[in-house]
Amino acid sequence: MPALISVRGPSGSGKTTLIERLLPRLAERGLKVGTIKHAHHGLTLDAEGKDSWRMWQAGAAAVAVASPHETFVRQRGGEPSLESLLALMPGELDCILVEGFADALDAQRVPVALRLAVTPSGVTCEGRRVSRNQLRRLEAAIVGCCGKEEEDGVSHR
């Protein structure tokens, strides 16, 4: 199972911005990273008028769209658990950044490798304050959780 990295904080604190900044940096280090986000509000995945949108509007219980470069699945029903979303993620991922899902993470129903708490003034990584400008420290912590080797050739797992 990929290492789970919890990214938590109040709305507007910069969680998504932090993830957005980390993703390309982690990819440069050779990590395959997935993300899962909890949305307290509705969301729109489709474009009005497209075939998949029309199928959804016509009442399909689920719609899957696949192309050579991406896939999405949309289904009706209750909110899925974090565990069920993790089961949908590709197996070749090194880690998954999870934004939200505090109840599941607090209940320790899934193992968390690293916890990041985001506030408007900065980031706390496992209880240690990290400046938003010190992404290198966060990258190193995440790389270590994934069992990958740092540039110095030492495994940080």
Image: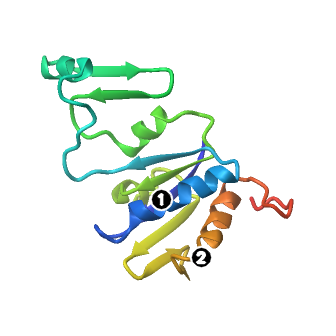
- Residue located at (50% from left, 53% from top): 97
Label 1 Cα crowd, 10 Å radius (few <14 / some 14-19 / many 20+): some
Question: 45 and 105: which one is in front?
Answer: 45
Residue 60 is at least partly visible in this image: no
Label 2 Cα crowd, 10 Å radius (few <14 / some 14-19 / many 20+): few
Q: Which mark is residue 19?
A: 1
* Residue 132, horizontal then vertical, whole percent: 51, 76
Tag 1 and tag 2, C-beta contact below 8 Å: no
**Mark positioned earlier in the residue sequence (1 or 2):** 1
Residue 130's image quarter? bottom right
Farthest residue in the right direction? 153
Locate the N terminus by quadrant.
top right
Q: Amino acid at mark 2?
A: Gln
According to the picture, the residue beneath numbered tag 2 turns out to be: 134
Label 1: element kind: helix
Locate the C terminus by quadrant.
bottom right
19 versus 39 height, above or below: below
- Residue located at (41% from left, 38% from top): 85
Residue 84 is at least partly visible in this image: yes
Label 2: element kind: loop
What is the spatial separation of the Cα atoms under label 1 and label 2, in whole angstroms?
A: 14 Å
Which color scheme did the rendering employ for the protein? Answer: rainbow
- Residue located at (28% from left, 36% from top): 45
- Residue located at (38% from left, 53% from top): 104
* Residue 29, horizontal then vertical, whole percent: 70, 53
